[in-house]
């Protein structure tokens, strides 16, 4: 008989948040590769009356990890949602919401923090962290008010730029903050069976 887990890595799950499910390892699989990003934090809502610009939300953490699996075993996963942008206010807006975390089988990519509504001496929302190989500091912050939920979940080289970015702050002219980008996950296993 052949050696278990001897096949090449194949994509088994590709999902954008918010989502959850269970990845069940194929009978011969003994290893999984996970690429994941948490949801981006929402931008802070702008205020009127010459208040300072609201801050942008932080990008979700992004990482890669190789993990052991047992053939036939189910592994629940969760994909983080984007943080909503904070609403604007006449005097001051409201801070954006944090992005949700993405996780499976011991891997976690935390969501980015929401942007503050009062930009006075406040930095943008902090970037999330990730377990395994943490690539959060290598991501460029992609901001889009209309994210396409699955266009970035086609290969490991694309997911990083399309998902998990923080939302822009609402400025100081009564604009609401932009939502962050959704989290995403790619799960590969080492068998073609």
Image (cartoon, grey):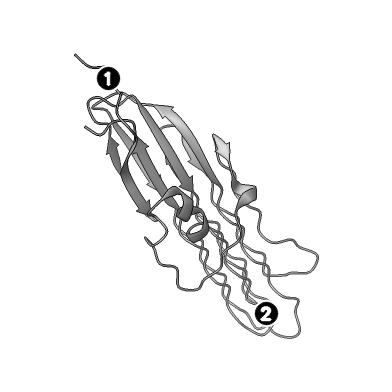
The reply to whether callout 1 and callout 2 are in contact (CB within 8 Å) is no
Name the N-terminal-most of marks 1 and 2.
Answer: 1
| Label 2 element class | loop
Q: Say whether residue 50 is left or right of residue 87.
A: right
**Quarter of image, res 77:** top left
Q: Residue at x 56, y 75 (%)?
A: 87
Q: Say whether residue 125 is left or right of residue 71.
A: right
Q: Nearer the viewer, mark 1 or mark 2?
A: 1
Q: Few, some or many C-alpha atoms within 10 Å of disc 1 (few <14, some 14-19, many ≥20)?
A: few
| Residue 143 visible in rendering | yes
**174 or 141: which is nearer to us?**
141
- Residue at the limit of the structure toward the top, as seen here: 1
Give the mark count: 2
User: What label does residue 47 carry, if any?
Assistant: 2
Q: Few, some or many C-alpha atoms within 10 Å of disc 2 (few <14, some 14-19, many ≥20)?
A: many
Please state, as top left, top right, bottom left or bottom right, where the C terminus lies in the image: top left
Q: Say whether residue 116 is left or right of residue 83.
A: right
Q: Residue at x 46, y 54 (%)?
A: 159
Question: What percent of the width, then of the height, locates residue 132?
Answer: 54, 34
Question: What percent of the width, then of the height, locates residue 95?
Answer: 62, 66
Please state, as top left, top right, bottom left or bottom right, where the N terminus lies in the image: top left
User: What label does residue 14 carry, if any?
Assistant: none
Q: Residue at x 65, y 49 (%)?
A: 137
**Quarter of image, res 55:** bottom right
Question: What percent of the width, then of the height, locates residue 176?
Answer: 57, 77
- Residue at the limit of the structure toward the right, as seen here: 121
| Label 1 element class | loop
Question: What percent of the width, then of the height, locates residue 101?
Answer: 48, 47
| Residue 19 visible in rendering | no
**Structural distance between the alpha carbons of marks 1 and 2:** 60 Å
User: What label does residue 4 carry, if any?
Assistant: 1
């Amino acid at each position: 008989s052949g050696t278990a887990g001897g096949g090449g890595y194949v994509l088994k799950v590709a999902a954008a948040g918010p989502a959850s499910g269970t990845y069940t390892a194929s009978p011969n699989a003994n290893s999984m590769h996970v690429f994941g990003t948490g949801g981006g934090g929402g931008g802070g809502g702008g205020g009127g009356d010459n208040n300072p610009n609201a801050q942008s939300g932080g990008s979700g953490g992004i990482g890669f990890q190789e993990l052991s699996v047992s053939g036939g075993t189910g592994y629940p996963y969760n994909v983080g949602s984007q943080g909503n942008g904070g609403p604007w206010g006449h005097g001051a807006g409201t801070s954006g919401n944090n992005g949700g975390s993405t996780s499976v089988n011991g891997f976690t990519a935390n969501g980015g923090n929401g942007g503050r509504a009062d930009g006075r001496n406040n930095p943008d929302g902090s970037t999330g962290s990730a377990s395994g190989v943490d690539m959060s500091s290598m991501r460029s912050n992609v901001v889009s008010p209309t994210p396409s939920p699955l266009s970035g979940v086609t290969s490991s080289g694309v997911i990083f730029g399309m998902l998990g970015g923080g939302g822009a702050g609402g400025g100081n002219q009564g604009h609401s903050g932009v939502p962050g980008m959704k989290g995403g996950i790619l799960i590969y296993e080492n068998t073609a069976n």
